[in-house]
Amino acid sequence: MDRRSFLVKSSLALAAPFIVPSSVLGKRNGAVAPSEKIVVGVIGIGPRGRYVLSAMLNEQDVQVVGVCDVQGDRRKAAKGQVDAKYGNKDCAAYRDMFELLGRDDIDAVLIATGDRWHALASILAAKSGKDVYSEKPCGLTMGQCQALSDTINRYGRVFQAGTQRRSIGNFQLAARLARSGKLGKVHTLNASVYRPRVRYDWLAEEPQPPVDVVDWDRWLGPCPWRPFNKAYLRGGWHTHWDFEAGSMLLDWGAHTVDLCQMANGSDGTTPIEFTPHADKITARYANGVKLVMDFLATPFGDRSPHFQTHLGTCPVRYEGDRGWVETGDSGGIEVHPDLKVELADFRRSGAGTAADSHVRNFFDCVKSRGLTAANVDVMRKSHIACHAAAIAWQLDRKVSFDPAKEEFVGDDEANRMRSRAMRSPWHI
């Protein structure tokens, strides 16, 4: 018996007559019974977190009840965002995520912290019985992605990586064309990525604010300790080795390489070799298909000769012996002239940054317990492919990779780079 049926039958069984509001028993005028709502908490509320939170707040069968951030101004802003949506002051605000994760009434969490916390926070959420929507990159290292995948599967939780382009129409159509044979035999996949870069220095020490303003120790989390500097809090952590996944390569590669994996039907595997070049990293799958990760100063397609059209950020291009397809965040799509007929029924979708469809897919799977579009196993392989490419770039040499064992072949130096130490007391 589901929760709604239990409420209905229980109300009918009571001897004393009373009226049960329709808003409790089921839907009316778009309302959803409180008993059928998915209760959500949020951990980490930066710009992307606020954006995804807004998409979640628009879902009528979702109730956000708590927000958590180590920065006081972000806690306040997120609580205000939720309270304004619901017209009350009921949203709880936490500095410590363990207080939010300890709530038995929360079904699922959105994790939108910085990269350094994604894997560990997701693992802790899964162990506390919560389903997880995590922004990307979902792990700083291969080892973190493996541990996250293993934990989600062990605890039977629903997981959605925030690679939302998998749920957007133009990217889906481009992948279908590649897999359907319409392009002929696919031989090359092009993924735009940021030019990898990394820095190992520390910013100058500044006076550390009170813990209620910024909990600096918790902001650092599992990363090595360093002195406080407010620039870190406003995006200045990017490119710093301690905080960044894959030397910036996963910033866009988590999306574009993931889309190429989908187009190649390679969600369960990775390329088997990675070779760095001055302007790109090339990789090769066991089926012979080449993956080209183009280094772009910005993620716009007009900065690389491999992209012939300008379709916005995060462009991808799939090439076969009978044609090609290219698409990007504008929502548009271009194909070889002989394939124009394949776009007859295509209707331009929303921007590639939009999270609405991806969020809906997540909540539908929370209810059905099915696999999401960017489930944890899909994330595992696409993220590992990106990390392997980044390691090849760091070593500045070709590396061979075993997708089944998820390790480099005969390469101790590369294999040591699959994981990093974590600052006590944090561990996976």
Image (cartoon, rainbow, N blue to C red):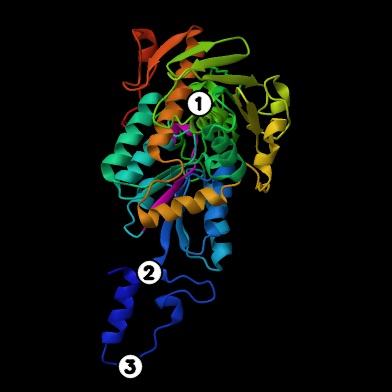
Where does label 1 land, which residue? Answer: 244
Specify start and end residues of the magenta stretch as a single range. Answer: 106-117
Q: How packed is label 2: few (under 14 Cα within 10 Å), some, or many (20 or more)?
A: some
Which is in the foreground here, disc 3 or disc 1?
3
Where does label 2 land, which residue? Answer: 35
- Report the amino acid beneath label 1: Glu
Q: Earlier in the sequence, mark 3 or mark 1?
A: 3
The image shows residue 356 at horizontal and vertical percentages of 56, 51
The image shows residue 6 at horizontal and vertical percentages of 29, 74
Q: Residue visible at 57% across and 19% down? A: 292
The residues bearing labels 1 and 2 have C-alpha atoms spaced at a distance of 40 Å
- Report the amino acid beneath label 2: Ser
Which quadrant would residue 301 be assigned to in this image?
Answer: top right
Which is in the foreground here, disc 1 or disc 2?
2
From the viewer's perspective, is 159 left or right of 44?
left
The image shows residue 169 at horizontal and vertical percentages of 59, 45
Badge 1 marks a residue whose secondary structure is loop
Q: Residue visible at 30% across and 35% down? A: 150
Q: Earlier in the sequence, mark 1 or mark 2?
A: 2
Which quadrant would residue 294 be assigned to in this image?
Answer: top right
Where does label 3 land, which residue? Answer: 17
Q: Residue visible at 35% across and 11% down? A: 409
Badge 2 marks a residue whose secondary structure is helix
Q: How packed is label 1: few (under 14 Cα within 10 Å), some, or many (20 or more)?
A: many
Q: Earlier in the sequence, mark 3 or mark 2?
A: 3
Q: Residue visible at 32% across and 74% down? A: 5
- Report the amino acid beneath label 3: Pro
From the viewer's perspective, is 126 left or right of 173?
left
* Residue 252 part of the magenta segment: no
The image shows residue 110 at horizontal and vertical percentages of 46, 48
**Nearer to us in this view, 24 or 337:** 337
Vertical placement of 332 versus 102: above or below? Answer: above
